Every structure is written in structure tokens, then in C-alpha cells.
Amino acid sequence: MKKTVKFLSLAMAVLMLFGIMNVSAYAGEEKEYTIISPYKDVIWEGENAWGAYKGTLHSHSTYSDADESLDVMVKEYYEQDYDFLANSDHGVTGTPWNEKQPFVPLYFYQAGKTAHLTDEEFEGITSGTYPLYDGTVRGKGMTCVTGANELNNLTLTKSHVNGYFLPEGAGNGFGGMENGFELAIKFIEDKGGLSHINHPGDWLESNANPSAVSDPENVAFFADLLLKYESCLGIEVFNENNGVTGYDRILWDNLLMSVLPYGKNVIGFSNTDAHNRKNVDTSFSVFMMEENTVENIKETMQSGSFFAVTRCIRGNDLIGPEKDIDVRNQNLPYPIFTKVEVHEHNVTVEAENADKVQFIADGKAIYTAKADGEVTLELDKIDGAEDFQYVRAELFGEGGVCLTQALIIDDGSEKAVYEEDKSLSAFIEDILFLLKSTRLWTIIVEIGRLF
């Protein structure tokens, strides 16, 4: 009997030792990582809390191809409680809203339809003393962001790029070239501005072919531009009602996975791209800032401490939602994060006007919860979390969808160095791409589609 007990005790000790050794070995294999949040400096509550400022950086007027004049559009944004606006007409670098914008011959048909604010209206709107439609005073101003321009205005391929903080007159009449993303991005960088790629799904025609946003060649095409030009901050993940850009949020995930290993983030922008008043309540951003100034808007664009909001989103089987959402112009409160905080390997969020929060990592939904009070994602409880490159959160509510920017997971490993491919095959591909980027080729292709 004693021998049996002794044997069992020895066996248990060996098993315990083996277990400890296994745990130790497993712990040694775990990667150490840090979650880097673009919201780390935001003060969410208290006397010094930052403001949440609603705005858009991409809008239009009859100074280019819109249906309504600049004064009408500015007043509609003001009415709908926007805190900042950058008017970015095609090939027209915006000046203050009380000035006549530059004339671009392409839009000769808009002659007699253009109008800007009076000095009195401009002062009232930027100070918040201008009355709303019902005669009440709003009490807070709307910041005028000048120097914005949607370049490549004379293209059939919709290879549009928004430039920001351009010098006065730079880019006026910029026709660009077909498929000419790089031409526009380089021009903006050379002028000292910032840029983002507009509605990439429109160029990819991904609504007809959703897999285009995950095609390695397409992802590499945009990733190369983002890596080559530091001033190109990211892409629009939401644009207007997302009618032709329903899968750009998936493209965003693919680009994050491609670009983050090189140490660069991809900022996800959300803009109305409105050409009339009915599309002012479509897609927009909420910037977290200490104060609503142009300088802070510029800094926030670069840091990513803002949220992308849309009233419309395309359903999909990859990261949802299950069904399309379209709640434009229904006066519904939009979902918004009121806190995004990181504690070691945990991400805690709070929200308003939301029913559900889901977390996305490396293009896949990893955790979903009811948006009720604080919701914490404990990454250490998620299989393979140490190998994630980023995590981001999404809110779904009656009034639409709201996204955080990517929170980067940094394991301290050395970043790759981007090198442009200068091989013979790459050179040949570039020549063929330039050929396909001529206007003649594009016109032939468009005619071919008619038959």
C-alpha cells in the first residue's frame, strides 16, 4: 500500500512538474506587444474634455459639377449641425466661402448658377450667430477649411484624389490623367499638402465584382501609393451613400494588413461627397479635438483621432452587416463612441445611440457584444491575438454605423523598408499601365462597353 501511495505521489509530482514546464514553455513563446491607439491623448470627460466635432472634408458646389451653389450647400451643412467643412470642387482649390471661387472652363455650363456667401453670412456662420431655418440661433460656429481640391477632374476612370491645405490657386484646372492617382498624389505632396484616395471602389467597380477589393494586385496597387507618398494619409472608407463604394471598408482592412508591416498606418476617412442638399446627411466624420480650429483639424487628420460615420452601408458575409442599412435624412441620432481606452492588452469602449459593437482584427470579426455601458475586448482571451496587426471597433445603431480608426498592435519587431520595384517586368507593367491610362484607350474601352 505504501509503495502504491509513493508511486502515485511521485507520478503526480512528475505530472505537476511537466505541467509547470509546459506552462513556462508556452509563456516563453508568447509575444509581448503594445496596443497603440490614435485616441491615447483624448480627454473623454471632465472639465478639460475634448469636443466631438462633426464635419466633412469632401463636398461640392456649382463651381464644379454639383446641383446647388456654394452658399446653399454651406447653409445646409450649418443647418445640419456640422462643425467644419472643406469644399473640394473638382479642379478648384477652395477659398473662403464668401469669395468667388476660381473658374474652370470645364464647368462652363454652370455659368449663372454659382453663388457664394456674403461677408455678413460668412461672419455669422463661422461665429455661430447666423440663424437657422426656423430663425433660432445655433450658437456655435462652423469652421471653414480652405485649400481643398478634388484632383483628376477630367477623367472617366474616377481616379480621384482629394488634396488639402494646398496653396491658393495650386491645382486649379488640374485635369489629371486616366488612372492617374499617383500624378495627383505627387502633385499634392510637392505643394506641401495632404491627401487621401477618394472612393477607390468606384475605380475598381467593386459593386459589380466585390472580390476586387481583396484582389492582391488591386491591394498592392493602392498599398504602393500609400507607402511611396507619406503625405497620402489613407482612403475614404465611406463616401456619400456608398452606392458605388459598398466594400471599401473591406479594402481598408486589406490595405492595413499590407501597409502596417512597413510602419505606416492607413487612415479611414468618411465624407459626404455631396453634390446637393439631400446628400448632406450621408457619410461624415467626428473629430476629437481640444478646439475646433483648422490647425487641429489638420493634426487630427494625420493622427487619426476621429471616427467615421455613415447612414448607409452595404451588407456582406465577411464582416457584416447581414443586411443593407440606409437611414438617410430621418433625423436619427447616429451611433458614436464616447470613450476608447487601452489598458495593457485590453480595449475598452463606451458608446451612445448604439445597439451593438463589434471588433475587427486583420479583416475578421473577433468579438461582438451589446453596446451597453463599458465593453472591453480582452485580447489575451482571443486565439492568435499576439499575431494580429491591428484591431478596430464598429458600432451599429438605428441611426447608422460608426468606426474607430485602427489601433495598431506593435510587437516591437523591426519594420520592413519599402523599396520600389525596379525590375524589368515592373517596368513593362508600368508602360502598359501608362498606355491604358491614355484618354484614347479609355474612350475606346468605354465605347466597347456599349456593345
Image (tube, rainbow, N blue to C red):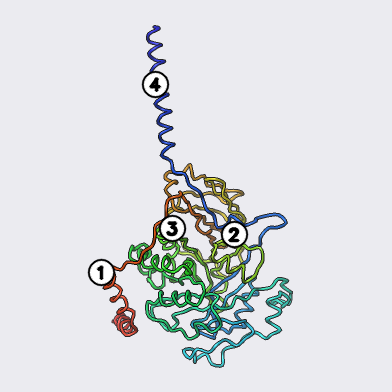
Q: Which residue is mark 4?
A: 14
User: Element at badge 4?
Assistant: helix
Give the mark nearer the N terminus: 1 vs 2: 2
x and y, in percent, of residue 371 in the image: 57, 51
Residue displayed at 37% across by 80% down: 178
Q: Nearer the viewer, mark 3 or mark 2?
A: 3
Tell me how far mark 4 sits from mark 2, CA to CA: 54 Å
Q: Which residue is mark 3?
A: 260
Q: Are marks 4 and 2 in contact (CB under 8 Å)?
A: no
Tell me how far mark 1 sits from mark 2, CA to CA: 47 Å
User: Element at badge 1?
Assistant: helix
Residue displayed at 62% across by 70% down: 295
Q: Which residue is mark 1?
A: 425
User: Element at badge 2?
Assistant: strand
Residue 370 vertical position relative to residue 420 in the rendered view, above or below: above
Residue 425 appears left or right of 136 = left
Give the mark nearer the N terminus: 1 vs 3: 3
Amino acid found under the numbered disc labelled 2: Ile
Residue 435 appears left or right of 171 = left
Tell me how far mark 4 sits from mark 3, CA to CA: 45 Å
Q: Nearer the viewer, mark 1 or mark 2?
A: 1
Q: Which residue is mark 2?
A: 336
Amino acid found under the numbered disc labelled 1: Ser
Tell me the quarter of the image containing the C terminus: bottom left
Give the mark nearer the N terminus: 4 vs 1: 4
Tell me how far mark 4 sits from mark 1, CA to CA: 61 Å
Q: Are marks 4 and 3 in contact (CB under 8 Å)?
A: no
Residue 380 vertical position relative to residue 127 in the rendered view, above or below: above
For disc 4, the neighbor class at 10 Å (few under 14, some 14 to 19, many from 20) is few
